[in-house]
Amino acid sequence: MEFTNPQEAEAKVAARYRVFFILWVAMMVSLLFLLCLAVFVQGSGRSNRTMSYAFFAISMVLVIASLLIKQRQLRQAIENRQVALLQNAYILGFALCEAAGLFGLLDHFVTGSSNYRFMFALAVLGMLVHFPQKDHVRAVSYKQF
């Protein structure tokens, strides 16, 4: 993108960043809603430690994969200067972290275990790491790095 006016370029960056920030907030609210659902609705499953540990392992893999995939796609987006790749990187990272929270909810309802809190903590930690950065949008919009 070629901008003749620096204010115009920064306005475009701010608008794109606002979209990423709104998506991030929506996903955090979604995780909070799922956590409230787990806290206030009693799990009716039978205790199964093996399944609970499997859900935790899957959640951990999802959060780690979200970080690795986002980093790789972010690098590609900056190299190719494609906003679509940047958007995919953020959305995929957000979705994988939310999936970790969903496995926590599944653990709560299937096994009745209280280990779901750790999976939600992983999901929220992953989402905090995925907080949108305006520098990424600037780097994709015009050469900065």
Image (spheres, rainbow, N blue to C red):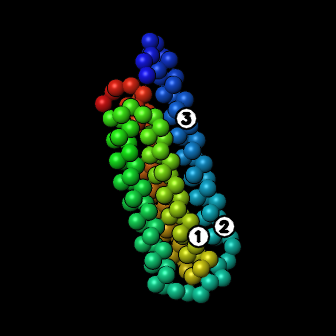
Check residue 18 in the rendering and tell me which mark sits there, or answer none.
Answer: 3
- Classify the position of the N terminus by image quarter: top left
Relative to 38, does residue 76 appear above or below in the rendering?
above
Question: Which image quarter: residue 31?
Answer: bottom right
Q: Where is residue 56 in the image (x, y as percent from the top left)?
A: 46, 73
Check residue 37 in the rendering and tell me which mark sits there, or answer none.
Answer: 2
Is residue 131 visible in this depiction of the protein?
no
Ranked by sequence position, the earlier of labels 3 and 1 is 3
Mark 2 residue type: Leu
The residue that label 1 is drawn on is 105
Mark 3, other Cα within 10 Å: few <14 / some 14–19 / many ≥20: some
The number of numbered discs placed on residues in the rendered structure image is 3
Q: Position of residue 25 (x, y in %)?
A: 57, 47
Mark 3 residue type: Arg
Contact flag, marks 2 and 1 (Cβ < 8 Å): yes
Ranked by sequence position, the earlier of labels 2 and 3 is 3
- Classify the position of the C terminus by image quarter: top left
Q: How far apart are marks 3 and 1 (CA)?
A: 29 Å
Q: Which secondary structure lies at badge 3?
A: helix
Q: Which secondary structure lies at badge 1?
A: helix
Q: How far apart are marks 2 and 1 (CA)?
A: 8 Å
Instruction: Identify which residue is drawn at 48% across, 74% down.
Output: 55
Is residue 2 visible in this depiction of the protein?
yes
Instruction: Identify which residue is drawn at 36% across, 48% down.
Output: 71
Mark 1 residue type: Leu
Instruction: Identify which residue is drawn at 48% across, 85% down.
Output: 49
